[in-house]
Image (cartoon, rainbow, N blue to C red):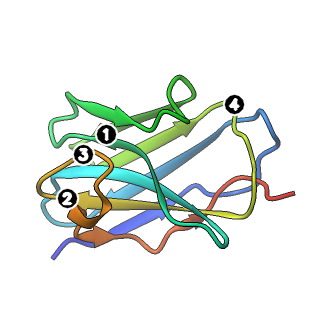
């Protein structure tokens, strides 16, 4: 069993930056970050392989978001620059044994999520 917990959510102005962190207990494999706005489907943002050597990004965040990990701390971070608030959003971190890409159904363990960018 893997327990995943996110932190770092908060208010940020349009064009600003926000850094989210995710800590996982137990063994961890590939990790991904996802976002869900109110009334919308959850979408993939970025993923990173277990070694940290490979990453994947959604086209909408390429060049603005950076995912990284520290395996000594079992943590994964998402640096969001040039944030573009659209609506109230919840950011979630998830663990997968098989992928670091956008296939949500392949992520087995999910955190509770944190509120992200400024909805106003």
Question: Farthest right residue?
Answer: 120
Say left or right for 78 vs 1: right
In the image, residue 69 lies at what x, y percent? 31, 39
Which sits earlier in the primary sequence, circle 1 or circle 2?
1
Q: CA distance from mark 4 to mark 3?
A: 23 Å
Label 3 crowd (10 A; few <14 / some 14-19 / many >=20): many
Label at residue 69: 1
Which x, y percent locates residue 92? 46, 62
The vertical placement of 30 against 4, above or below, is: above
Mark 1 residue element: strand
The image quarter in which residue 14 lies: top right
Determine contact: label 4, label 1, CB under 8 Å: no
Give residue 96's mark: 2
Q: Residue at x 20, y 28 (%)?
A: 53
Looking at the image, do the residues carrying marks 1 and 3 touch, with CB atoms under 8 Å apart?
no
Q: Is there CB contact under 8 Å for labels 2 and 3?
A: yes
- Is the C-beta separation of discs 4 and 3 under 8 Å? no
Q: In the rendered image, which quarter contains the N terminus?
A: bottom left
Label 4 close to label 2 by CB (< 8 Å) = no
User: Which of the two labelled residues, at mark 4 and mark 1, occupies the earlier sequence position?
Assistant: 1
- Inter-mark Cα distance, 2 to 3: 7 Å
For the point 33% across and 43% down, the residue is 47
- Up-down relation of residue 15 to residue 103 (above or below): above
Label 4, label 1: how far apart the Cα atoms are: 21 Å
Of label 1 and label 3, which has the lower sequence position? 1
Q: What residue is shown at x 75% (from left), y 59% (from top)? A: 87
- Pointer 2 local density, CA inside 10 Å: few below 14, some 14–19, many at least 20: many
* Front of the two marks 1 and 2: 2
- Residue that mark 4 sits on: 82
Residue hosting label 3 = 100
Seen in the picture, residue 103 relative to 41 is either above or below; the reply is: above
Q: Nearer the viewer, mark 4 or mark 1?
A: 4
């Amino acid at each position: 069993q893997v327990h995943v917990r996110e932190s770092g959510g908060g208010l940020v102005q349009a064009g600003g930056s926000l850094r989210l962190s995710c800590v996982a207990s137990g063994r961890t494999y590939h990790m991904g970050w996802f976002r869900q706005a109110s009334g919308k489907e959850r979408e993939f943002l970025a993923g990173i392989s277990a070694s940290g050597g490979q990453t994947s990004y959604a086209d909408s965040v390429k060049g603005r978001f950076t995912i990284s990990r520290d395996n000594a701390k079992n943590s994964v971070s998402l640096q969001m620059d040039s944030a573009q608030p659209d609506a109230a959003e919840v950011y979630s971190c998830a663990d997968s044994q098989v992928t670091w890409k956008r296939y949500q159904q392949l992520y087995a363990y999910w955190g509770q999520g944190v509120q992200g960018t400024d909805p106003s």
